[in-house]
Image (spheres, rainbow, N blue to C red):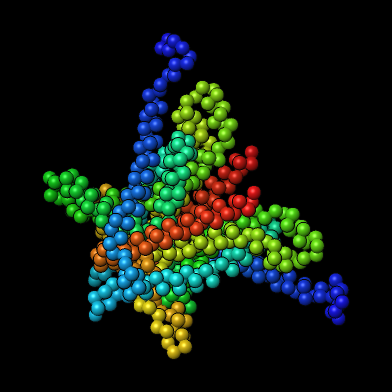
């Protein structure tokens, strides 16, 4: 044996120190997320609040005129807020049914071989950068929508033509972007429904379709709602994909008018804004942040509710 | 039933056929959209992407366009972001899974991690711009961008590591502790190696998110497109992190704004191939992970 002491309590102290240091380090790492969320919240408020005091909360939130660079500037973002809400709602109304039906297809009716090709493809769709969606939106969707616009408003001289950059184009891009989220999460929700539900329903004489719509989808409800809420979060927070296709005019959100979302308002003017204008852009960011936090709270509630259901 | 004489005769329900039609219609819409996107980008991009496109930088004098600078910037941002996010992410997961006792703190950490995952990238962009860019004085730089993205990908790494740690059997822990290993020794030699596939999956997913990110980088990392200068001893490579640097997605966005659609499609194709590669890699690892479990 060597000279070293082999007592099992010999280096007890150093070991203890290492243990304590390790513990402290891991606690710190755990707290990073907490610190990050708190500082993001703090900084969003710090940078978003000054404009509220300067311009007035009512004038910003309920003003309808957006003229940040005029001699007498006005900073009303009501139309921008409405656009974000209505645009998101429309995208959900289009994207969720298609996504849910695709999830049903993948989980229930598709032949296994086809499902095994489609599923990875959907996952790929989820990974495509949002700017690529924007690029395709400008080059494929916009011209298409412009043709429809020309046909629809042929006889109405009052209409301001948007060249295909309008709410409906942006909504379609958003609807496509939330598809993978909705499909993936709904499919796993549908699949996690216990198979004896399905067997019992089929044994009672219900057809496959009745089973899907009356048993499986209701049983997977909480998962599907999660998918929808995540879809809302993704749609309302998306900026780059719709920046080029929304038209960027501050208007009421009608399908064929050029509109500006909360996100695109920030992206398109942050580069050159200064002074109060810039502060108002941060206020827009704050409004968006409040929306997102509300969505997160809802999501958190649903997830917890879902867990309780599963326990029973 | 008056309509069917035999119970073997299947009653066809009109509503059922309608539902089938809707299901197949919606599924084919989804599939067509996907195939359309991938096919169109390949079709338009393949003509643009060549060796020169990948290895040169935009130059007004030579009249060339290339994305070498953007590729280097992307690599810089990926590496620095991961260097920051991975240790903290793994550490946080270890704390949640190995040290913490269920209670208020754990709930708070888990809630904030969820929240962080749900914040849209443009908010991260604004925060990074104000906090790292202005308050810490890092301005538009690769470092600002990386710090911002590190916060953004933190939940991805924490969650994947946590999932992996959960699958490590409890007997490993009691075995290691039982033969006299300290907790830190056990974590270092047993838990982290066992959780490696999950950690790597988290890292790869993060790389995917970083490569595709644009809104969070626009106001933080800026839009430089030049290659780093080497300097006398290679110090230029390190200095580069304090300069502006646009990633591939940012360059794609800028090309779109200038209506340079050809170049934009070239970059889109490169991005699509990267995303595809990342997807395959995650699949492969997940598969390998599964085999280990059995």
Query: Is residue A108 in view from this perspective?
Result: yes
Q: Residue A128 vs residue B201: left or right?
A: left
Q: Position of residue B216 (x, y in %)?
A: 42, 66
Task: Please name the residue shown 42% across and 48% down the image.
Answer: A122
Residue B97, compared with residue A217, is above or below; it is: below
Give whichever of B106, B260 is nearer the camera: B260
Residue furthest toward the bottom? B232
Question: In this rendering, would B277 be left or right of A68?
Answer: right
- In this view, the residue in front, A216 or B232, is B232
Which residue is drawn at the image coordinates 63% and 59% (left, top)? B195
Is A237 left or right of B89, judged from the image as shown?
A: left
Residue under the point 57% across and 27% down: A200
Residue B42 x %, y %: 32, 56
Tell me: residue A121, above or below residue B15: below
Q: Is residue A86 above or below residue B95?
A: above
Disc tally is 0
Image coordinates of residue B294 in percent, x first then y, are 64, 49
């Amino acid at each position: 044996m060597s000279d070293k002491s082999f007592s099992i309590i010999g280096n007890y102290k150093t070991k203890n120190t290492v243990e304590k240091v390790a513990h402290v380090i891991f606690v710190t790492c755990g707290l990073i997320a907490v610190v990050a969320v708190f500082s993001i919240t703090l900084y969003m408020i710090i940078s978003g609040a000054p404009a509220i005091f300067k311009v007035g909360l009512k004038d910003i939130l309920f003003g309808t005129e957006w003229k940040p660079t005029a001699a007498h500037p006005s900073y009303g973002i009501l139309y921008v807020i409405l656009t974000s809400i209505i645009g998101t709602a429309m995208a959900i109304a289009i994207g969720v049914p298609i996504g849910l039906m695709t999830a049903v297809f993948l989980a229930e009716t598709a032949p296994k071989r086809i499902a095994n090709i489609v599923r990875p493809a959907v996952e790929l769709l989820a990974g495509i950068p949002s700017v690529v969606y924007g690029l395709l939106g400008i080059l494929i969707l916009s011209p298409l929508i412009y043709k429809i616009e020309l046909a629809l408003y042929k006889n109405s001289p009052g209409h301001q033509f948007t060249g295909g950059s309008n709410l409906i184009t942006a909504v379609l891009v958003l609807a496509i972007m939330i598809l993978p989220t909705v499909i993936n999460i709904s499919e796993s929700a549908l699949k996690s429904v216990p198979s004896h539900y399905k067997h019992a329903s089929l044994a009672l004489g219900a057809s496959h379709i009745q089973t899907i719509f009356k048993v499986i989808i209701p049983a997977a409800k909480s998962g599907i709602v999660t998918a929808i809420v995540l879809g809302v979060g993704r749609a309302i927070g998306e900026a780059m994909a719709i920046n080029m296709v929304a038209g960027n005019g501050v208007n009421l959100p009608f399908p064929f008018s050029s509109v500006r979302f909360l996100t695109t308002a920030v992206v398109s003017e942050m580069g050159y804004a200064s002074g109060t204008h810039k502060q108002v852009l941060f206020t827009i960011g704050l409004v968006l942040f409040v929306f997102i936090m509300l969505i997160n709270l809802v999501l958190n509630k649903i997830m917890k509710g879902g867990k309780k259901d599963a326990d029973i | 039933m008056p309509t069917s004489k035999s119970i073997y005769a299947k009653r066809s329900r009109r509503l059922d056929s309608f539902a089938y039609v809707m299901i197949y219609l919606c599924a084919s819409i989804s599939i067509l959209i996907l195939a359309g996107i991938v096919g169109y980008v390949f079709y338009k991009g393949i003509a643009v992407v060549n060796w020169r496109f990948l290895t040169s930088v935009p130059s007004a004098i030579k009249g060339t366009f290339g994305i070498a600078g953007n590729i280097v910037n992307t690599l810089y941002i990926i590496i620095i972001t991961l260097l920051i996010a991975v240790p903290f992410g793994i550490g946080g997961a270890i704390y949640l899974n190995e040290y913490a006792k269920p209670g208020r703190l754990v709930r708070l950490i888990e809630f904030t991690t969820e929240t962080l995952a749900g914040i849209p990238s443009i908010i991260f962009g604004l925060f990074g711009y104000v906090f790292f860019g202005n308050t810490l004085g890092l301005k538009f730089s690769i470092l600002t961008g990386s710090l911002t993205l590190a916060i953004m990908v933190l939940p991805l790494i924490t969650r994947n590591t946590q999932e992996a740690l959960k699958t490590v059997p409890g007997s490993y822990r009691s075995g290691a502790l039982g033969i006299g290993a300290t907790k830190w020794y056990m974590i270092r030699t047993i838990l982290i190696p066992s959780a490696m596939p999950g950690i790597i999956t988290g890292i790869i997913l993060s790389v995917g998110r970083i490569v595709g990110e644009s809104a969070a980088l626009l106001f933080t990392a800026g839009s430089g497109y030049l290659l780093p200068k080497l300097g006398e001893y290679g110090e230029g490579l390190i200095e580069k992190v304090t300069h502006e640097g646009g990633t591939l997605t940012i360059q794609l966005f800028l090309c779109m704004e200038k209506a340079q659609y050809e170049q934009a499609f070239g970059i889109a194709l490169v991005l699509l191939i990267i995303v595809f590669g990342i997807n395959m890699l995650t699949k492969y690892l997940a598969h390998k992970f599964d085999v280990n479990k059995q």
